[in-house]
Amino acid sequence: MKPDRALVLHLGVLAALLAVHFAAPAYHHTNIARIMVLAIYAMGYNIAFGYTGLLSLGHALFFGAGLYGAGLLVYHAGAGAAEAMVAGLVAGGAVALAVGLLALRTSGVAFMIVTLMFAQAGYLTVLYFGAWTRGDEGIVILQAARSIGPLDLSDDGTRYLVALALFATALLVNLALVRSPFGRVMVAMRENEERSRMLGFNPFTVKLGALTISGLYAGLAGAAYGLMFGYVGASLASVQYSILPLLYVLLGGAGTVLGPFLGALLMFYLIDYASAVTDAHQFVTGAALVLLILFAPKGILGTLRAKGVKWLP
Amino acid sequence: MTNKLLTPNPSRRSVLKGVAAGGALLATGMTPRFVQAQSSAPIKLGFQLHRTGIGASYGRWYERTATAALKVLNDAGGINGRPVEIVFEDDGTDPKRGAEVVEKLTSQANCDLIFGTLFSHVVMGSAPRAGELKVPYLVCSEGHHVASGALNRWTLQPGITDVKSQVQSMAPWVTQMLGKKVTMVFPDYAFGHDHRDFFTAAVAAQGGEVIKHVAVPPTETSFTRYFPQIPSDTEVLYHVMVGPAVLTFVKELGEFYGSGARPQIFGFIDSLEAVNIASPGLEFLEGTHFWEGHPRYKQADASEAETAYRAAVGVDDTGASVSDPADIATYAHMFSVWETLFAIKDAMQAAGYQGPDDRQKVVEAMEAMTGFDEGNEHPQGPKVFNGKTHQAFGLQSISRVEGGKLVRVHQTAMEDGFYPDEVDYTTQSF
């Protein structure tokens, strides 16, 4: 029987990340944990954008829903981190579903603008209810409240392994999704919505499903970020956090399962190293993206797939 | 007792530490030379700097102040006889990046402690990581977040009074000298809400009343439409604004009142930090009052320490850079960087600091402090330090714009800024 190359590759990446846990210096160890959480967010973004063709500029709303869905529950209601994580996941999905019901009546540029506006409304809502959210300043989730059962999420080792577990689950679900019949319909919507409709698929339902799954990923990532790193603040729900997953996906390769992780990893270290060299690190990042769009518009893994690694999901 | 519940990989850190320690021993031939090298090696202090982002105008001067203070410190022998280095790292005035910078300065640059952060959201985003890394994190933020108990035992604010204390100490003079019916204009986010809540309560305690709160959304770049909300029977207009639009805010306030009757105007200098008071359109500020943490214009009774501080940082008597009169300092706040560095020196010396293993001793030494005397190390004035709340208290100035200059007309008493403790960090575990 022929080995499933794609599955082997993805399991290999997960194994490598487990090895990183034992080998990486402290600084990079925490960074990779952070990157894995952000990659979950980017994977969710990729399901909507890379696979279904929904260019959203409002995903910070879903990330923020998860962040605040979890954070406020812990901070004000004294909920446990496990319940909060589930609440964040559900909040991200529910908000995406609600937004999708309205925003998916539009498409193209209008969809971008509507999602951007929803996200801005969400960001301003966080500021408006400053008495609960402490607005821009945000709230700190105390160390004692950041435990799931016996797992203390403020501990470096535990945090890494929990991040890896969440990332692995998200990655394998993503892989299964894009290889499933529904995943193929998502791609069909991206490639030719009218033809898909002719074949009997309801574009609205498919896109709503994809956007909701995307919201679940974003919500989980938001909740995980708040609980693992102890901070819930409005800047994490700002427009910048709608753009970041787009950049991660573009860099790594839209419509590839590993692209979001690769993009998040490279972007993080690009900013990290550039800021050590120059104050104009944002210029460096921008220039890198311009070069990418000019010479490898499909992103790194997208280009690899186009150049011959056609089995890359 | 520790609140660590379970570490599923007890071997990871110990393995890494073992490898590192083994390598170090091999490299040094297991001789006492290693101990000697450590004790004479420079102390590295990490500085979380707002070099870019919304805090950049402050960050530029915070860096200059820290660099000047470092020279004075090293010229006087450093800390425990060891030279001191500062590693600056830009956080983009962003809380997520702030936490990463704390990580970088601690784990990669091997800094002994971290200081210098101004913006409250960066402090809030970074303090949890400092607590996890068990590295002293000394902020220059003036936020109430430290004294409110929201943070952790590793976070302290020894160099600047918090906003609750500042605001509270202003209220008696404002209500007695300017009027009792106050309208407040403030940014509609946490920093502004602190002003709103603390000053409203303080005015009420003085028998006055805040008759209107005008909250301005942080995304606003034009303010004209907010000013008609100011009630006509307002006796005192209290304003505070931060960010890149402060000059627009103040100019539009002047345009709103024109040459007609206006209430007394009392502002926090935050509305004018890094802005030249002689800018066109700001003439209406003549006769208005400002809170200043540290008077921008050199006062007639300035101390020798104050004069030396200005010269060291490169600020002239008007609060501008000596090399560029158009470059106005963030003078009301940046003293906190200078004073925090010398508070660090005192704490490290009291703790007999040798290396990262003594970080906890530094926090405990600082908690044991009760204050700092005015002098070259504390040019803004004396400080009372509350070891339980990790918060310093100092004297505040109220200045009046006279002939285009800010002239101090009142200085608060230390007691004006005291309030009951809201936390006792010394009861928390490390």
Image: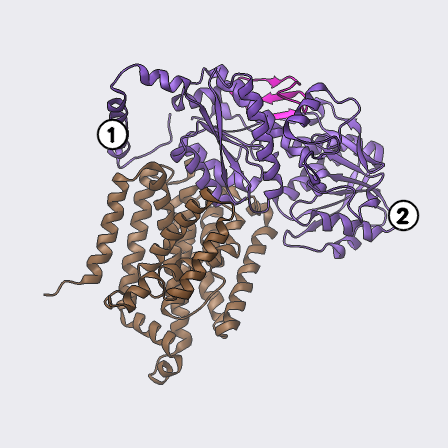
Q: Residues within 10 Å of mark 1 (few under 14, many from 20)?
A: few
Q: Which residue bears the numbered disc 1?
A: B19
Q: Main secondary structure of the magenta part?
A: loop
Q: Residue at x 24, y 66 (%)?
A: A309
Q: Nearest the camera: B346 or B57?
A: B57
Q: Nearest the camera: A176 or A102?
A: A176
Q: Is residue B367 visible?
A: no
Q: Which chain is purple?
A: B
Q: Residue at x 55, y 36 (%)?
A: B117
Position of residue B230 measured from the top left corner of the image (x, y, whole percent) = 79, 50
Q: Secondary structure at mark 2?
A: loop
Give the side of residue A23 with respect to residue B271, left or right.
left
* Mark earlier in primary sequence (1, 2): 1
Position of residue B251 measured from the top left corner of the image (x, y, whole percent) = 77, 50
Position of residue B201 measured from the top left corner of the image (x, y, whole percent) = 71, 36
Q: Secondary structure at mark 1?
A: helix
Q: The C terminus of chain B is located in which quarter?
A: top left
Instruction: Identify the hue of chain A.
Output: brown
The answer to whether residue B387 is magenta is yes
Residue A310: name its quadrant: bottom left
Q: Nearest the camera: B4 or B31?
A: B31
Instruction: Find the magenta span and give its range.
Output: B366-393
Q: Is residue A274 visible?
A: yes
Residue at the outermost left position: A1
The answer for how far apart the CA atoms under marks 1 and 2 are is 75 Å
Q: Which residue bears the numbered disc 2?
A: B261
